[in-house]
């Protein structure tokens, strides 16, 4: 979409940042909003307008190829970490009520062992009984 103008967003945010106003490409080419193929409600006025932050991080976020194998691999890793963090939160690891580092390390180790045992149990439940007997002898 063609950039129409920029402005600084200072309200409703913690950090002021630059925002770009992007207009409908049909309006930019023809100068008339009557060429809108989807009959958008704003087409009769000035055409469709979108506001997006112009910082490099925000542009990259909108330009990511979310169908690529690399994105899917990284996303799967991240969601696995989030699931483990959620389990740890449920088990009380986020804010331990212990006083020294060694005690906290011990309780964290026990909680991670518990999380891994739960994962192993879920894997065993998914395997057929005959296969599980041969592959996962502990």
Image (tube, rainbow, N blue to C red):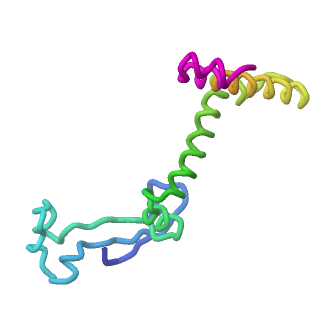
Instruction: Tell me: residue 63, above or below residue 6.
Output: above
Per the image, is 134 magenta? Answer: yes
Residue 29 in the image, given as x and y percentages of width and height: 20, 83
Residue 57 in the image, given as x and y percentages of width and height: 53, 65
Instruction: Report which quarter residue 112 is drawn in.
Output: top right
Q: Quadrant of the C terminus?
A: top right
Instruction: Report which quarter residue 129 is drawn in.
Output: top right
As rendered, which of 63 and 49 lies closer to the eye?
A: 63
As rendered, which of 15 and 67 lies closer to the eye?
A: 67
Instruction: Tell me: residue 30, above or below residue 97.
Output: below
As rendered, which of 16 and 80 lies closer to the eye?
A: 80
As rendered, which of 116 and 32 lies closer to the eye?
A: 116
Instruction: Report which quarter residue 49 is drawn in.
Output: bottom left
Magenta stretch in the rendered image: 120-138
Horizontal arrangement in the rendering, residue 102 relative to residue 80 (left or right) = right
The main secondary structure of the magenta stretch is helix
Q: Quadrant of the N terminus?
A: bottom left
| Residue at the (16%, 82%) spot, across then down | 31
| Residue at the (58%, 17%) spot, across then down | 130
Horizontal arrangement in the rendering, residue 36 relative to residue 63 (left or right) = left
Residue 109 in the image, given as x and y percentages of width and height: 80, 28
Instruction: Tell me: residue 4, above or below residue 104.
Output: below
Number of numbered tags placed on the structure image: 0
Horizontal arrangement in the rendering, residue 4 relative to residue 130 (left or right) = left
| Residue at the (55%, 60%) spot, across then down | 15
């Amino acid at each position: 979409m063609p950039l129409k103008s920029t402005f600084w967003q200072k309200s409703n945010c913690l950090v002021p940042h630059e925002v770009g106003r992007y207009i409908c490409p049909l309006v930019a080419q023809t100068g008339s909003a009557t060429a809108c193929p989807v009959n958008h409600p704003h087409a009769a006025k000035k055409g469709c307008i979108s506001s997006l932050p112009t910082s490099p991080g925000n542009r990259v976020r909108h330009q990511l190829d979310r169908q690529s194998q690399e994105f899917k691999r990284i996303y799967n890793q991240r969601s696995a970490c989030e699931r483990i963090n959620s389990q740890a939160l449920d088990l009380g690891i986020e804010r331990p009520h212990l006083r020294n580092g060694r005690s906290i390390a011990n309780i964290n180790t026990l909680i991670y062992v518990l999380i891994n045992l739960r994962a192993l149990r879920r894997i065993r439940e998914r395997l057929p009984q005959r296969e599980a007997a041969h592959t996962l002898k502990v």
